[in-house]
Amino acid sequence: MNARNSALPDLQAWRKSSYSSEEGGACVEVALRPYTVHVRDSKDINRPVVEFGSEAWAAFVGFTADRVG
């Protein structure tokens, strides 16, 4: 996992979490790349972006899906 302050290329399509609402709660957006997944705060897109390897992201999603169900 890495945090980056630099802006990411516009080529990335950011997708907001399906659990996000317009009420201003805890929202994240993700952008998928071939070997990494970028995560940012959807309320403040100028803050640093967190970067995960695709295998680490898959493990995280699997772990949370098992618990949220």
Image (cartoon, rainbow, N blue to C red):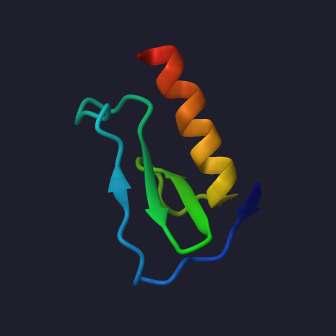
Where residue 23 appears, x then y in whole percent?
A: 26, 29
- Quadrant of the frame with the C terminus: top left
Residue farthest toward the right in the current orientation of the protein: 2
Is 21 positioned to the left or the right of 61 in the image?
left
- Write the residue at 58% across / 47% down: 58
Give left or right: position of 30 versus 4.
left
Residue 8 in the image: x percent, y percent?
54, 77
What percent of the width, then of the height, locates residue 34? 54, 75
* Percent of width and height locating residue 63: 60, 28
Question: In terms of depth relative to the viewer, which is nearer, 36 or 15?
Answer: 36
Figure check: 4 above or below 42: below
Which of the 4 image quarters holds residue 59? top right
Total count of labels: 0
For image coordinates 76% across by 54% down, the residue present is 1
Residue placed furthest toward the left:
22
Residue at 59%, 58% (x, y): give it. Answer: 47
User: Depth check: 53 or 48 in front?
Assistant: 53
Image position of 25 (left or right of 41): left
